[in-house]
Image (tube, rainbow, N blue to C red):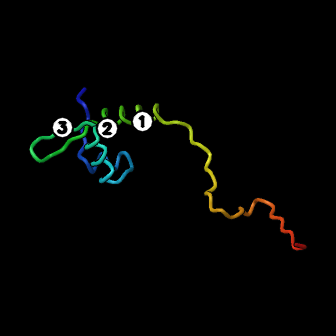
Amino acid sequence: MADEVMTMPEAAAYLKIHLATLKRWIQQGVIPVAKIGRRVLVRKQAVDEALRQHEQRRRPPTPAKAPETGRPSSRREVRCDLDG
């Protein structure tokens, strides 16, 4: 069975990402390509493998921290001493 190949726009649509993101991933070596003249072809199998590797490297999300603004957040109780 021959490997299915896609053009860059087809690969970006397959991944549901912007074409510029795909180009960046290709430049970073995340997804290998084959260049034939001016045409750049992406193997579907290579895209699927890159996704599998990315899924394995992902860490669980960390809880978001409240930004330090120097002001009390709306969740804290604010006490004022007005007899001072």
Which percent across, then down, holds residue 74? 73, 63
Cβ atoms under marks 1 and 2 closer than 8 Å? yes
User: Could you say where residue 18 lies in the image, as x and y percent from the top left?
Assistant: 34, 54
- Mark 3 falls on what kind of element? strand
* x and y percentages locating residue 65 in the rendered image: 62, 51
Q: Quadrant of the N terminus?
A: top left
Looking at the image, residue 33 sits to the left or right of residue 22; the answer is left
Q: Which residue of the protein is positioned furthest toward the top in this rendering?
A: 1
Numbered marks: total: 3
Q: Amino acid at mark 2?
A: Val
Q: Secondary structure at mark 2?
A: loop
Relative to 82, is 15 above or below?
above
Residue holding disc 2:
30
Q: Please state which of residues 8 and 20 is positioned toward the viewer in this rendering.
A: 20
Q: Nearer the viewer, mark 3 or mark 2?
A: 2
Q: Residue at x 28, y 38 (%)?
A: 29
Task: Determine which quarter of the picture holds residue 2.
Answer: top left
* Sequence-first tag of 1 and 2: 2
Q: CA distance from mark 1 to mark 2?
A: 9 Å
Q: Amino acid at mark 1?
A: His
- Dot 2 alpha-carbon crowd within 10 angstroms: few under 14, some 14 to 19, many 20 or more: some
Residue 77 drawn at (x, y percent): 81, 61
Is 67 situated left or right of 73 in this image?
left
Q: Nearer the viewer, mark 1 or mark 3?
A: 1
Disc nearer the start of the sequence (1/3)? 3
Please give the residue where the numbered disc 1 appears in the rendered image. Answer: 54
Instruction: Check the picture and name the quadrant holding the C terminus.
Output: bottom right
Taking the image as shown, residue 50 lies to the left or right of residue 78, namely: left
- Taking depth in this image into account, of 16 and 66 the one nearest to the observer is 66
Q: CA distance from mark 1 to mark 3?
A: 21 Å
Q: CA distance from mark 3 to mark 2?
A: 13 Å
Where does label 3 land, which residue? Answer: 34
